[in-house]
């Protein structure tokens, strides 16, 4: 009885979750019908658990930026720069045994550098927006180019190849039979969900996006909250960069370029209001799973990558139009 009440409460609170679940089931059914022998393979679903966490973390980061009515177009640049800086450290400190056998202390230092990169990048974004008064889309577009430029300068263009075994475990390992990236995503997603729903910071972020004037009269320090939100998006982007570099055993300035469009699409599709004030980690998670199933199906059916990019863009426009129509109707 209690479980039924919880489900009913969830449906009443966010009907978008139900729509996402229905869409996910439909995608699964269609792809299964089109190519059951390839789509239903265990390897296909296992590979998804390794790939979707990095996109999921970038999408959660995008959602957090949108909660305050902003956006962060620098997340992919931050992710790549974080992985590259860690890679540069590993190559500089590699001993005679080689990079693969780099000590755990060096790996931990690389993690600190990567996370610190995300924190500094997020702080820069937040200060440009709050102190300089620059529009979030312009500020993060500019810093994204700066971070990508720094990555190119550090690498000279080619990818940095070769990471320690312990680092690669974060992108390719298994914990209790589950993909390590999936376990990391589940833990971080649960933590962010708790933060948004059970802490003062999360509630204040929601309030600022819902009604900035009411937040001002309530005594909330909007600039500080916005700064914190971009610092958090930067750290999440750096975690995505760690997982990406660990999975591919390389880091490059242009890795994951398509992730930016997909992260925006997933955030909006997951129920995040681009104007601020509404968004859930659960919605983002379901939207990521749906799009990963769809992307996997496209690849199995041998769709062109250019056509897939066109579909993502058209899908994003369609979702925005539908949401705008719903808001106008309300």
Image: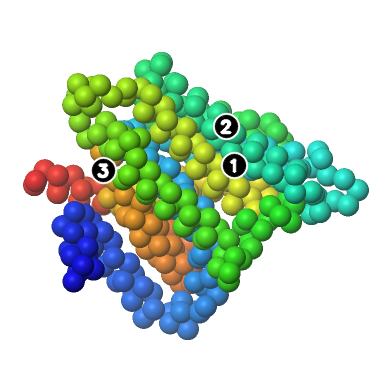
Considering the numbered disc 2 on the image, is that residue within a helix, a strand or a loop? helix
- Of labels 3 and 1, earlier in sequence is 1
Q: Which residue of the protein is positioned furthest toward the top in this rendering?
A: 132
Considering the numbered disc 1 on the image, is that residue within a helix, a strand or a loop? helix
- From mark 3 to mark 1, how far is it between C-alphas? 28 Å
Mark 3 or 1: in front is 3
- From mark 1 to mark 2, how far is it between C-alphas? 8 Å
- Residue 33 at what x, y percent from top left? 36, 81
Task: Look at 18% across and 71% down and name the residue there.
Answer: 1
Return the residue nearer the eye: 292 or 2: 2
- Residue 92 at what x, y percent from top left? 81, 38
Return the residue nearer the eye: 246 or 265: 246
Q: Residue 290, relative to residue 151: is it above or below?
A: below
- From mark 3 to mark 2, how far is it between C-alphas? 29 Å
Within 10 Å of the Cα at label 2, are there few (<14), some (14-19), or many (20+) other Cα atoms?
Answer: many
Residue 80 image label: 1
- Of labels 3 and 2, earlier in sequence is 2
Q: Is residue 223 visible?
A: yes
Q: Quick check: marks 1 and 2 in contact, CB under 8 Å?
A: yes
Q: Which residue is mark 2?
A: 147
Q: Which residue is mark 3?
A: 278
Task: Look at 32% across and 24% down and name the residue there.
Answer: 222
Q: Residue 95, relative to residue 41: is it above or below?
A: above
Considering the numbered disc 3 on the image, is that residue within a helix, a strand or a loop? loop
Return the residue nearer the eye: 132 or 224: 224
Q: Residue 13, relative to residue 3: is it above or below?
A: above
Q: Is residue 138 visible?
A: no
């Amino acid at each position: 009885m209690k479980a039924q009440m919880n489900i009913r409460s969830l449906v009443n609170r966010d009907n978008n979750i139900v729509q996402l679940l229905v869409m996910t089931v439909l995608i699964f059914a269609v792809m299964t019908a089109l190519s059951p022998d390839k789509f239903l393979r265990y390897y296909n679903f296992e590979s998804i658990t390794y790939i979707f966490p990095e996109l999921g973390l970038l999408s959660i980061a995008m959602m957090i930026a949108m909660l305050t009515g902003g956006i962060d177009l620098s997340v992919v640049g931050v992710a790549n720069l974080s992985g590259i800086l860690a890679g540069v450290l590993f190559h500089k400190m590699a001993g005679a045994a080689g990079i693969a056998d780099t000590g755990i202390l060096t790996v931990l230092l690389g993690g600190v550098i990567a996370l610190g990169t995300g924190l500094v990048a997020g702080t820069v974004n937040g200060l440009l927006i709050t102190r300089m008064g620059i529009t979030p889309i312009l500020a993060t577009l500019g810093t994204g180019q700066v971070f990508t430029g720094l990555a190119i300068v550090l690498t000279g263009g080619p990818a940095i190849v070769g990471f320690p075994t312990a680092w690669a475990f974060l992108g390719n390992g298994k914990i209790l039979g589950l993909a390590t990236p999936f376990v990391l995503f589940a833990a971080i997603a649960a933590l962010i969900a708790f933060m948004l729903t059970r802490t003062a910071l999360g509630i204040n972020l929601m309030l600022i996006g819902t009604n900035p004037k009411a937040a001002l009269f309530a005594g909330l320090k909007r600039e500080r909250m916005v700064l914190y939100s971009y610092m958090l998006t930067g750290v999440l982007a750096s975690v995505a960069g760690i997982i990406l570099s660990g999975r591919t055993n390389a880091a490059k300035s242009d890795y994951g370029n398509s992730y930016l469009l997909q992260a925006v699409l997933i955030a909006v599709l997951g129920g995040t209001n681009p104007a601020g004030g509404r968004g859930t980690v659960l919605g983002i998670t379901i939207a990521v799973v749906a799009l990963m199933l769809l992307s996997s199906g496209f690849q199995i059916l041998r769709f062109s990558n250019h056509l897939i990019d066109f579909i993502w863009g058209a899908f994003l426009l369609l979702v925005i139009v539908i949401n705008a129509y719903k808001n106008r109707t309300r």
